Amino acid sequence: MPLWHIYCPKGAYSDAEKRQFSNRISDAYTKFGMPRFYVSVIFHEVDQNSLYIGGEPANDFVRIWVDHIARSLEPQHRGWWMKQVREIVTPFVEPRAFRWEAHVDETPTELWTIQGLKPPPEGSDAEKHWVSENRPSIY
Amino acid sequence: MPLWHIYCPKGAYSDAEKRQFSNRISDAYTKFGMPRFYVSVIFHEVDQNSLYIGGEPANDFVRIWVDHIARSLEPQHRGWWMKQVREIVTPFVEPRAFRWEAHVDETPTELWTIQGLKPPPEGSDAEKHWVSENRPSIY
Amino acid sequence: MPLWHIYCPKGAYSDAEKRQFSNRISDAYTKFGMPRFYVSVIFHEVDQNSLYIGGEPANDFVRIWVDHIARSLEPQHRGWWMKQVREIVTPFVEPRAFRWEAHVDETPTELWTIQGLKPPPEGSDAEKHWVSENRPSIY
């Protein structure tokens, strides 16, 4: 459900680092009881001189776009969540002096399936089963 | 209007298969009277170890993200539509044992143009003309 | 805040042209007082036979998808804005006989940060400071 698109400079992260980064993202969601396999992260390496900030090439920039589907944030929790995002991302941008920007969109839960299955309601026994098995199954 | 982004493993589909897949998607919309050229499909081949599910590399995963623009679904039709999506996608994931996930977003019709033209209202004569010509034209 | 994704044929634009195109986009926002560095543009070169329109390969097609975050358009201004988009884009598609389509989504301002900072309110002194420095800073 959360789908993180990470647009980063070519070669910004090794495979091991991409795995660490995506695990760090996954941890931030599973601590609230979400099945771990809900968390998808795609790294898109952007070619040199293909990302522009204010009209200038920005080859040191990481642009993160996130879609939330399974859960939506109460308005009063949005600022809190963006601080979580900062905590997640900081170790992967600051030491490299990458500039970065992130935004989250929220899309309708009912327009979402995994393996063609409608995911179970939040907090349901079926969802707990999906958590424990860490894969989708008919319920 | 529907824009399908298909993030798939490198080499997952031949050119002929991409064409079949996108025709199958197009058929699902045109049977409801939509101009065929409204249906855009972009295949994005994802590099090895660039897509992660729950923190683990998922080189067997097809992630589909769809934007609906020209039409929005009544809440009671959303489940039905996701079954249509499953029917469309199944022949292109099951035989290859690909795991997959799909979600649809809906965006404002008034913030959409083709060739700089605002598409005609649903069901209008102008839309029927676009259907029969299969291209945008001034109306 | 505006994030423009431009999906274009491989080699469609030189580095100089990408810079011109993104400057033209940036100009369209800064004339309304927006910090110039809010404007991000990513060019995605699409492989041959990877974009399909109505099931047919479309190797002459530019598909533009825009996310608006910092500002949302009043319904009565939407048509006007899409004309601005046409003016921005035309010099980069017409001389090359590219077909094109564009749509804009609007996402929540509160779910957006730059360098981990929540951008200042529209029209505030802090925003004017960001405009004049053309970079984010603590306020």
Image (cartoon, coloured by chain):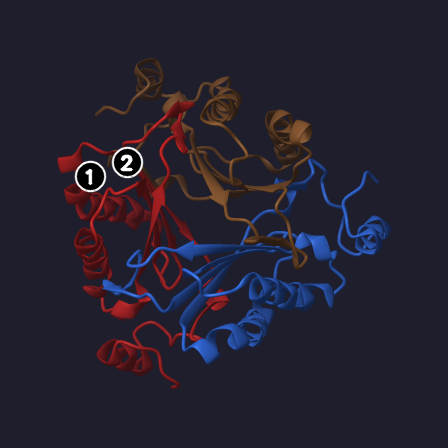
Chain colours: A brown, B red, C blue
Q: Chain of mark 1?
A: B
Near-viewer residue (C10 or A31): C10
Name the disc covering residue B100, or none: 2
Residue furthest bottom as drawn? B139
Q: Earlier in the sequence, mark 2 or mark 1?
A: 1
Name the disc covering residue A88, or none: none
Q: Are marks 2 and 1 on the same chain?
A: yes
Q: Is residue A35 visible?
A: no
Q: Is residue B51 visible?
A: yes
Three-letter code, disc 1: Val
Q: Is residue C121 left or right of residue B136?
A: right
> Is disc 1 surrounded by few (<14), some (14 to 19) or many (20+) residues within 10 Å?
some
The image shows residue C48, relative to residue A110, as above or below, that is below
Answer whether labels 2 and 1 touch (C-beta < 8 Å).
Answer: yes
Three-letter code, disc 2: Trp
> Is disc 2 surrounded by few (<14), some (14 to 19) or many (20+) residues within 10 Å?
many
The image shows residue A131, relative to residue C122, as above or below, that is above
Rendered location of residue C128, percent (x, y): 83, 55
For image coordinates 56% across by 69% down, the residue present is C78
The image shows residue A18, relative to residue A55, as above or below, that is above
Choose top left, top right, bottom left or bottom right for residue C49: bottom left
Disc 1 is placed on an element classified as: helix
Near-viewer residue (A91 or C108): A91
Rendered location of residue A137, percent (x, y): 24, 23
For image coordinates 40% across by 29% down, the residue present is B52
Rendered location of residue B106, percent (x, y): 42, 53
Circle 1 is placed at which residue position? B93
Q: Chain of mark 2?
A: B
